[in-house]
Amino acid sequence: MSGVPYFIDSHCHIDVSDFDSDREEMLARAEAVGVREFVVVGASGSLEQARKTVEFASADPRMHPTVGVHPHEAAKVDPSWWPGLCELAARPEVVAVGETGLDFHYDSSPRQVQIDRFVEHIELAAKLDKAVICHIRDAHPKAMEVLTKHAKGRVRTIIHCFTGTPLEARKYSELGFYVSFSGIVTFKGKSTRPVRESVACVPLDRLLVESDSPYLAPVPQRGKRNEPSFLVDTAGVVATERGLTLEELAAITVANTRVVFGLTSP
Ligand SMILES: [Zn+2]
Ligand SMILES: [Zn+2]
């Protein structure tokens, strides 16, 4: 495989049923372009679902599971299953807590409930000494307030699928957090231009790339079901914004992904 860079998809949902019909082929396509490891992110609205994600990813050494409740699902958290979720998150193969966070764009759960669950997830990550994966949409000021109080200097923090402005990217970086770019960085349009411009505001040792499959396929696959092999298109745009080659960007982001999640080299 000489000449093909080594990538880690730092955030994907390849356990979902969208991939049931062609999962093996999808993984082969990823392998062919160098995407060889996957952080399989839990976004469950139930303990059962969280368990399934961990079981799915634990069965394959290329995959690294995480455990968390998506802010959309925050209102569904039943206090009776929170202890089970904490137990699951403590398992050694689980590399992070999340995704958690604040989504004030969709407001699928009441804001105060999202904030309360977010704090619980951050505190759990602190207790377990694991990274926390944050999904923040239209809620950056509040997220910074919560993260400054609970995560700064304590928890390895990832702002996944960054959708803010260059100023916000800079502020997250100053707090010591990792900023991850998804297919949105490839979109051509006025509304997503700040995301692309943000790439230059993140220090190289805090930069991550992700597919967020099956969502948000990058250009030129935009609108299709996303899959990890398309990560290369996102990485290409991020590399260009930084004046790096694809190989350099791959090496930098893989190193960062290993540090933040505590992954050992295979
Ligand atoms: Zn997300
Ligand atoms: Zn996600």
Image (tube, grey):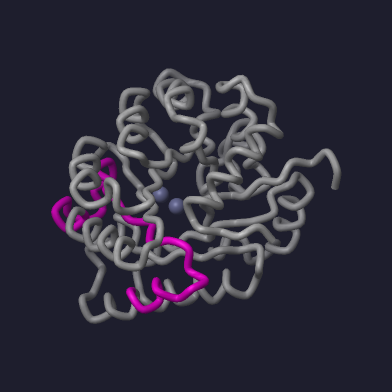
Q: Residue at x 25, y 56 (%)?
A: 118
Q: Is residue 147 left or right of residue 13?
A: left
Q: Is residue 152 left or right of residue 27?
A: left
Which contiguous range is marked in magenta?
Answer: 86-114
Question: Where's the C terminus, which quadrant?
Answer: bottom right
Is residue 27 in view?
Answer: yes
Q: Is residue 108 magenta?
A: yes
Q: Position of residue 264 (x, y in %)?
A: 60, 60
Per the image, is 60 magenta? Answer: no
State the image coordinates of residue 72 (x, y, percent, origin top left).
Answer: 30, 55
Answer with the quarter of the image where residue 233 lies.
Answer: top right
Asked whether 201 or 52 is in front, the reply is 201
In the image, what residue occupies the spot 22% across and 57% down?
A: 119
Describe residue 193's horizontal placement relative to residue 77 as left or right.
right
Q: Could you say where residue 79 lies in the image, as x and y percent from the top left?
A: 20, 76
Position of 46 with respect to 148 (left or right) is right
User: Residue 32, position in %: x, y?
Assistant: 79, 49
Number of numbered markers? 0
**Which image quarter: residue 240?**
top right
